[in-house]
Image (spheres, rainbow, N blue to C red):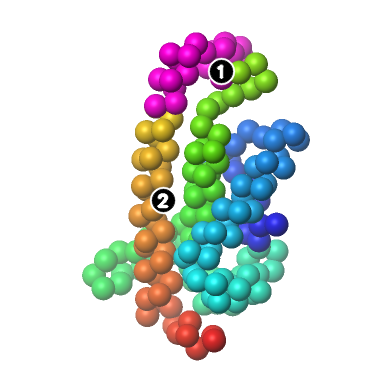
């Protein structure tokens, strides 16, 4: 079970349409992606401490809140700006979902929307759609990658007034 990201968090630019039959699949992607990204970002020990500090998906310790919440700080001459850990995780999970489910599809097949109706795409249209979608995924993933690097630098910078090594 995910600790931070929930299906209900996917709205706005990260909107994902899921119904009752697709929600279990989407939840499994959220669970595995969130865990993997937290481990990659924090390491196993810090992740365990962070998870233990969560209450209803939000950390209680002020030092964890510094990177969980949005921030903008000047560090080593660079402006570090983030919408916070949860927003970064939502973006990463969204990209994982798009990569695994690369097409807009329904029970009738790959579709293109036309007002309130949909048409099944030909193989050639599906290929063009997939290429366009792949380019959007790559661009979005690159943007999220930059956000992760900023978040990582912020977590391990002296901007946060504690040394994570003191936790161990």
Secondary structure state at the residue bearing disc 2: helix
| Segment tinted magenta in the rendering | 110-131
Q: Kindly identify which residue carries mark 2.
A: 144
Q: Nearer the viewer, residue 74 or 89?
A: 89
* Numbered tag placed on residue 111 in the rendering: 1
Q: Residues within 10 Å of mark 2 (few under 14, many from 20)?
A: some
Res 12 seen here: no
Q: Quadrant of residue 159?
A: bottom left
Q: Is residue 57 magenta?
A: no
In the image, is 96 to the left or to the right of 21? left
Vertically, is 64 above or below 22? below
Res 90 seen here: yes
Q: Residues within 10 Å of mark 1 (few under 14, many from 20)?
A: many
Task: Residue at the far front: name it.
Answer: 123
The residue that appears at 37% across and 33% down in the rendered structure is 135
Image coordinates of residue 107 in percent, x first then y, are: 67, 20
Circles 1, 2 touching at the beta carbon (< 8 Å): no
The span from disc 1 to disc 2 (Cα, nearest Å) is 27 Å
Image coordinates of residue 10 in percent, x first then y, are: 59, 43
Secondary structure state at the residue bearing disc 1: strand
Q: Nearer the viewer, residue 165 or 58?
A: 165
Image coordinates of residue 114 in percent, x first then y, are: 54, 13
Q: Is residue 115 magenta?
A: yes
């Amino acid at each position: 079970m995910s600790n931070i990201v929930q299906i209900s968090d996917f709205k706005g630019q990260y909107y994902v349409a899921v119904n009752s039959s697709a929600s279990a699949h989407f939840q499994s992607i959220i669970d595995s992606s969130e865990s993997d990204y937290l481990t990659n970002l924090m390491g196993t020990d810090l992740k365990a401490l962070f998870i233990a500090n969560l209450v209803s998906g939000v950390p209680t310790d002020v030092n964890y809140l510094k990177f969980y919440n949005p921030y903008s700080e000047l560090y080593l001459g660079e402006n570090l700006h983030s919408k916070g850990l949860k927003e970064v995780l939502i973006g990463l999970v969204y990209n994982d979902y798009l990569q695994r489910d690369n097409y807009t599809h329904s029970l009738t097949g790959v579709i293109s929307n036309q007002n309130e109706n949909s048409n099944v795409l030909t193989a050639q249209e599906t290929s063009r759609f997939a290429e366009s979608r792949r380019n959007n995924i790559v661009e979005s993933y690159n943007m999220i990658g930059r956000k992760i690097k900023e978040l990582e630098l912020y977590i391990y910078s002296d901007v946060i007034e504690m040394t994570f090594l003191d936790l161990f």
